[in-house]
Image (cartoon, helix red, strand yellow):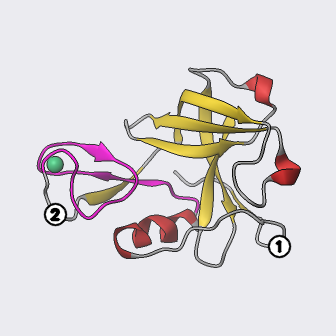
Amino acid sequence: MTAPVEDHREEWEGPVPVPSGANTAFWAATLEGNLLYQHCGECGTAQLYPRAVCTGCGAVDPSFESSVGDGTVYTYTVCHVPGEPGFGDRTPYVVAAVELTEGPRLLALVDCEPDAVEIGTAVEVTFWQVTDEAALPVFVPR
Ligand SMILES: [Zn+2]
C-alpha cells in the first residue's frame, strides 16, 4: 500500500511527531505513504502505537508490517473548540479512533465535513507531511 503524501509543512501549526526509539521506522515510512503497524511473531498481536515490546506477550522488538491503509471509524468526536494550539482555524474538525483492517486502532484526524462521519464509516489513509521527518496519517471516507 502506498497512499498519497501531501506537503503541509508550510501551513501546519499543530503538534508534530518527534521520531525516536521504537517509532523511528513508523515515521520514516509515513514519508513514503506507507502505514506500518507492529505484528508479533510470537503471539500474533497487532499493535499501534509502535512499542519496544509486544503488549500481548512481552516479546521484544515486534516486527513492522505494512497496513493496507483502510479501516473503519471505531469512535469519533467533532471538535468545535480546538483541542491543541494550531487547530483554531480548522474547527469544526473530526478526530477518530480508526480501527485498521489488520486490527490495531489509532487516533487520527478525519479530513471531511463532520456530518460525513459516523461509527462504522469506512475510511482510508492519506498522509500530511508536517516536518522533514514525519507525515501524519489522516483518514478520509472511502
Ligand atoms: Zn506477542
Image quadrant assignment for residue 94 = top right
Q: Is residue 77 visible?
A: yes
Up the image or down, 50 lies above or below 20; here it is above
Task: Tell whether position 99 is magenta.
Answer: no
Query: What residue appears at the point 23 percent right and 43 percent down from the top-left corner?
Result: 45
List the residue tagged with mark 1. 10
Residue 121 rendering spot, x and y as whole percentages: 61, 23
Residue 110 rendering spot, x and y as whole percentages: 68, 40
Up the image or down, 26 lies above or below 125; here it is below
Judge from the rendering whether residue 77 lies leftward or rightward of residue 11; answer left or right.
Answer: left
Q: CA distance from mark 1 to mark 2?
A: 38 Å
Q: Amino acid at mark 2?
A: Val
List the residue tagged with mark 2. 60
Query: What residue appears at the point 21 percent right and 59 percent down from the top-left corner?
Result: 53
Give the magenta range. 33-57
- Is tag 1's residue or tag 2's residue first in the polypeptide sequence? 1
The answer to whether the residue labelled 1 contacts the one labelled 2, judged by CB atoms less than 8 Å apart, is: no
Judge from the rendering whether residue 51 lies leftward or rightward of residue 128; answer left or right.
Answer: left
Q: Is residue 142 visible?
A: no
Up the image or down, 75 lies above or below 46; here it is above
Image quadrant in which the C terminus is located: top right
Residue 107 rendering spot, x and y as whole percentages: 54, 44
Query: What residue appears at the point 44 percent right and 64 percent down from the top-left corner?
Result: 26
Disc 2 crowd rating (10 Å Cα; few below 14, some 14-19, many 20+) is few
Image quadrant assignment for residue 132 = bottom right
Residue 66 rendering spot, x and y as whole percentages: 41, 53
Ligand 1 near label 1 (Cβ, under 8 Å)? Answer: no
Q: Amino acid at mark 1?
A: Glu
Disc 1 crowd rating (10 Å Cα; few below 14, some 14-19, many 20+) is few
Image quadrant assignment for residue 85 = bottom right
- Secondary element under disc 2, as helix, strand or loop, is loop
